[in-house]
Image (cartoon, coloured by chain):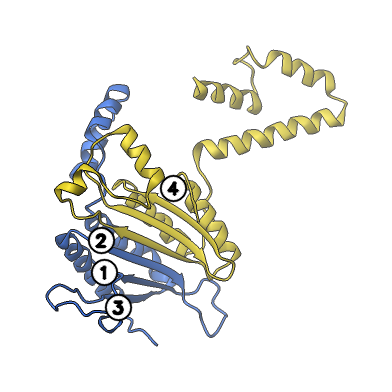
Amino acid sequence: MPQERISNDEFLNRLTILLSSTHSASRGSIYLTQKPLESTTESVSPPQILVRATNGLSKPHRTAKPKSAANSKPKIKLATVVEVADLDTFYARYAEVCKKGMEGLRKRDKKKAKEKAKAKKKGKAATGATGS
Amino acid sequence: MTYLADLHSYLHQSSLLIQAYPSTRITTKYSLPRKPNTKAMSKPSDGPAPTADTTAVASQPKREPSAVLTLKTYHPESGICLKYRTDKAAEVGRLLTGLGRLAKREVIEIPTAATAQIESGRAAEGDKMEIDSGVSAPKVEDKVVTAPPAVVQTGGGGGGKGKKKKGKK
């Protein structure tokens, strides 16, 4: 089944929304996949990269017992194709989106940072990281 | 299903796998912890996360569970699977630059200490070859005798050894 592919910009925008909505629900997962696109003409040595994002939920018709519509969130699938020339710019922005969106990860530990600051004077870097 | 210890070796191994099998795919899973209700707070039920959790708990006990980022490099045909798991926000940036480089099929070498070791290994091999050649055998002996105390000794090999020592301290 061919998947609808959206533009890189749209993908990143929707991924931002997907990340923030997952956070507001404070549960769930997001899967990001990247793989080279199988080209029919195998001339291009580094092919385009297909990047997908999904929230990993099942399609409504696959769930055994359909939950109430209010409870169940829809499956979200995003896919985009990144041209080789755009890889650098795309990944720079992709990284920004992920850094901002994955706010549930552990920030640099303040205790550890203090210890580090004692050992080395790395306090500045640590606060900078937590600030971002 | 191997979890690799650090990010660099994960990226390195993944780059090798992609070199070998270009159809390898990389999945990044960002999963939020279970809803932090009171029961979960007292005993976080992170069943499938033993290694990272134990270390985290050991270093900093009684912390609320954080989200976890799991990376999986997988080649379906051969079934080779490399994994890496982190919960550090600081690693996301490095990780994604790594993924970008993997997308471009670059070979990612392990920087710093590991490469230094490899280099020193190569240097040692060079020394051995010198020994094998036989002509410079006494010279080498001199080197071996003087090497441990003498940091002053010039030359690439000597310098490298001195550096390594400092690192150990």
Q: Earlier in the sequence, mark 3 or mark 2?
A: 3
Q: What residue is pinned by disc 2?
A: A97
Query: What is the C-alpha distance between the residues marked 4 and 2?
Result: 20 Å
Q: Is residue A19 left or right of residue B157?
A: left
Residue A132 seen in the current view: no
Q: What residue is pinned by disc 1?
A: A12
**Farthest left residue in view:** A70
What color was chain B assigned in the picture? yellow
Tell me the amino acid under the disc marked 2.
Val
**Farthest bottom residue in view:** A1
Q: What residue is pinned by disc 3?
A: A7
What color was chain A assigned in the picture? blue
Residue at image point 19% right, 45% down: B41
Query: What is the C-alpha distance between the residues marked 4 and 3?
Result: 30 Å
Location of residue A129 in the rendering, given as x and y in whole percent from the top left corner: 24, 42
Residue at image point 34% right, 76% down: A80
